[in-house]
Amino acid sequence: MTDPRAILLVKCPDRPGIVAAISSFLFRHGANITDFDQHTSEEDTGVYFTRLEFQTGKLDLPLDDLKHAFSLDVARPFAMEWRLTLSSDRKRIAVLVSKHDHALLELLWTWKRGDLRADVVQVISNHPDLRQAVEGFGVPFVHVPNSKEQRDGAEARMTELLDGKADLVVLARYMQIVSPAFVSRWPRRIINIHHSFLPAFVGADPYRQAYERGVKVVGATAHYVTAELDAGPIIDQDVARVSHRDSVDDLKHLGRDLERRVLARAVRWDCEDRVIVHGNKTVVFA
Amino acid sequence: MTDPRAILLVKCPDRPGIVAAISSFLFRHGANITDFDQHTSEEDTGVYFTRLEFQTGKLDLPLDDLKHAFSLDVARPFAMEWRLTLSSDRKRIAVLVSKHDHALLELLWTWKRGDLRADVVQVISNHPDLRQAVEGFGVPFVHVPNSKEQRDGAEARMTELLDGKADLVVLARYMQIVSPAFVSRWPRRIINIHHSFLPAFVGADPYRQAYERGVKVVGATAHYVTAELDAGPIIDQDVARVSHRDSVDDLKHLGRDLERRVLARAVRWDCEDRVIVHGNKTVVFA
Amino acid sequence: MTDPRAILLVKCPDRPGIVAAISSFLFRHGANITDFDQHTSEEDTGVYFTRLEFQTGKLDLPLDDLKHAFSLDVARPFAMEWRLTLSSDRKRIAVLVSKHDHALLELLWTWKRGDLRADVVQVISNHPDLRQAVEGFGVPFVHVPNSKEQRDGAEARMTELLDGKADLVVLARYMQIVSPAFVSRWPRRIINIHHSFLPAFVGADPYRQAYERGVKVVGATAHYVTAELDAGPIIDQDVARVSHRDSVDDLKHLGRDLERRVLARAVRWDCEDRVIVHGNKTVVFA
Amino acid sequence: MTDPRAILLVKCPDRPGIVAAISSFLFRHGANITDFDQHTSEEDTGVYFTRLEFQTGKLDLPLDDLKHAFSLDVARPFAMEWRLTLSSDRKRIAVLVSKHDHALLELLWTWKRGDLRADVVQVISNHPDLRQAVEGFGVPFVHVPNSKEQRDGAEARMTELLDGKADLVVLARYMQIVSPAFVSRWPRRIINIHHSFLPAFVGADPYRQAYERGVKVVGATAHYVTAELDAGPIIDQDVARVSHRDSVDDLKHLGRDLERRVLARAVRWDCEDRVIVHGNKTVVFA
């Protein structure tokens, strides 16, 4: 049985000496760095981002003490926002879904197969249809009817179900608007899959919009949800070629493959602490 | 030396018997069909599109007589819009360009290498920079200064240069707006390359827009130019993955490859009579 | 409720008049052609392939009589190999699988969702592991132990299970060699997914071979099984980019997505009568 | 005018403290690290690879002294193979070519446009055909006839032309075998473009081989040349989908786009010191 690796995510103002400070600190405390990725944004006055993984088997301090020492020795002098987790930590994922099952099932199978560093702990839907499929995976399913009129009540009920019980909320083709108030409870912790290559075809029925515009590629976009609809930081996108032969239904069919693949990838990256949000953009250390 | 093939493009209201009528007519007159592609639009009440190629070596009539017979026997009863050309016919292409040379050079090489069923007969630019490169290919280069203030004069000059002398006008990163009046002289005969996957990032500086939105794919779109900017029928699109590491300049660099490839493909398809415009969309028999 | 469409697949020596003969015949009998695709091979002395779909609602003959008439009027004079089916016909698919579930599950979901013009009627495995997953879809699961020593018995048992009960046999990562004798019972009716872009990495453990060769793309290939291992006619292939960062396990992980997508597409095309085998190659009217 | 950046490439046995040693050394001497990429191979007993870029404007030592200090303080204790260059250094590229111009022209245009951190200093061909095209770029062209019989003389002549005058030799569709003796003079400094996705279709006429096997993707591979034909370390590969409609000529046509793109990318990566060869594989910090 091997020791878990630790993952360190850092964002701070760029200046000389950051790499030396981090790596010397870790070396002093017995950590062997196995992965090191960094990025310096050239916008603004320079922002430094890094993600690194290190072995924890020979640390000279318990992890909590190491965190404390890191905070004092490194993070504070460099004004870092940072986060240190273990590869054995598992986020708790709640999925919100309506009637389409493809994106949900992809997550459930990926999880079941052991390919997700997280657990799907709950599925909430505004329709009862997918109960059996979900419960077959041993995951609780809750039906919370939702519509324009009953939104407040529905969101109150969902908040009650989720608060303190989920670390990440995934909208796997949840066909209801979520209110800014709801979103604000989960900053950068709600991931949505939009069925177009945003910013094209914002809003309802993007495949029909795509069909009517006569585009030759369709796409899907996974993004963090913000108060503004379809405008949050993009985590991943992918596209497929289409032609005049493809009807709206064909686009939907093709799009399902894109949606489930893009969403699963984005959720996996989030759960492995590979994503840093900066402004309305993401740095993805994939 | 082999006889040229003929290419027949047809658009008409859908109804039974079209294939039988066309193919029986051609068989009767000694034509052997080597390619047959068709599409029926399910929008409206049904529109039938077809493109076919046939050998002309054993025709029992001269081509002009065959056209006349086709018009009477087939096209009229089925209310067809149609067009019959030979694979030996070559469109005359005029290219409008500014300072970026990549899309232009791709067309010139493709032509030079014998891969374009057309001839580049003229290059017009609002800058003098590319004269030497163009003339090196033996193609006339005309510098027609253009700007918001002098647009009318510039377009009058270009019209004079183009009228009756070009069959297709290609905007290979021509960084000036062309007026609706100019466009209307060349219906469905002006192809533009836009440096985004339309309809995303309409208008100026799409790579900067893409950078600022933080997208994970960038693209390019070749389309026929209509009076409404960036809204004409799309012929082809392609995309490439990008990441947070890519600066605006990186996107431009990557985009150049997309632009030249997509534009060259669209021009080739147009020159081989593979594109039918219907409403604001295209049927591409590629 | 709409009438089913008919699908006609034809292969014959190329000569003038084929399109006219087929389309006139269909028009005379009240069929409206909705899709028409053809290909002429330039190898040998020319082979003509076509696939077309037509509406059956206004046929003047019952389908069996139409087939009989087609045989006499068209197929015989042109020496056609042909096949006429209805879009309402559904092939019976048997899946052979070992322990990997991804390719199997993709087929089962696709079928469950109604996207496959076929029925999965049986799953046979040389391991008992996937029984529960399969039976959850309401599909019978049979465990037939197999290994080099017991191959004859295992294949006899499988033949008994399959003969007359399946139209298509899909090897969804079935990790046993099937004998030439078994293959010969199902000519062009066994589809296998090989986990490399054939002809690269024939044989065992292709991901390890790919890793050791240091390739920058990995792939998957769906093909009809012939007596010669990994050498049958290819139906579809796809690839994904990889880098030095990817371990053998990463390649397997990535490859799973390729395998299930490529296999599902190949099976769908076969079930919709879109594939004609010619020599050791396929014509795919996708 | 900004100072050039320095690029450091390192390969050494993996052990704790490497990052700390490098980054502390650089920080002490006034270097600000702008890019840092690393990889640890899990094969063997662990090999550590890194590429980093740093600003040189505030170094406290001249570059040669810095190299000397690095050698003593860091490289020796960690048993590093290393290389330190400036972004202003430009490799001298010699291109060997036969009659196909596409891969050569792509390099020449990329260079002309300023997108290559290198200079094309010489083109050698076994045919005289491309002289004019090459000389139009102001690059010397030398015709060195070559064939099986005259190989020794031809290679002697080329060696004379290249020795001490080129840092990188690019085979841009050079259709002659080069001898092991010639290859051994340029270890890891000859890049070839092979027109298939190796290891498929080794040897002559890969497009015909691909056509005859009936594959659904074709590809191109850029690799360092070693004594064994088509078996050297792969730098980059790419593929395109094809179908039964594509003749051998169509594959060649499509392949040209792949070849020039893949080769240009591989050459760019080599010139920017992004490639480390390890055994028969490459680590590419792209």
Image (spheres, coloured by chain):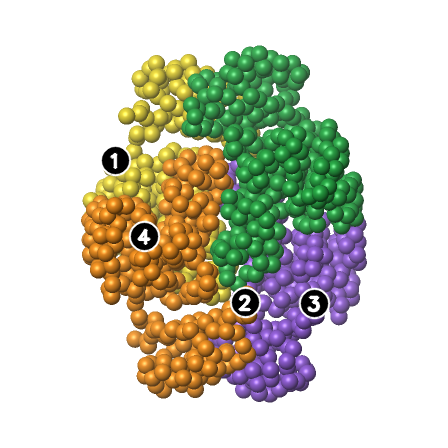
Chain colours: A green, B orange, C purple, D yellow
* In the depicted structure, whether residue A110 falls above or below residue A218: above
Please name the residue shown 41% across and 51% down the image: B230
Q: Which mark is residue C91?
A: 3
Q: Which mark is residue B178?
A: 4
The amino acid at mark 2 is: Asp
> Comparing marks 1 and 3, which lies closer to the viewer?
3
Residue position for label 2: B44
What is the quadrant of residue B42 in the picture?
bottom right
> Comparing marks 2 and 3, which lies closer to the viewer?
2
Q: Secondary structure at mark 4?
A: loop
Label 3 packing within 10 angstroms: few (<14), some (14-19), many (20+)? some
In this rendered view, identify the residue nearer to me: B51 or B81. Answer: B81
Please name the residue shown 35% across and 21% down the image: D56
Q: Secondary structure at mark 3?
A: strand
Residue D195 visible in the displayed image? no
The amino acid at mark 1 is: Gly
Residue position for label 1: D164
Same chain? Circles 2 and 4: yes
Q: Is residue C8 left or right of residue A214?
A: right
Q: Secondary structure at mark 2?
A: loop
* In the depicted structure, whether residue A113 falls above or below residue B270: above
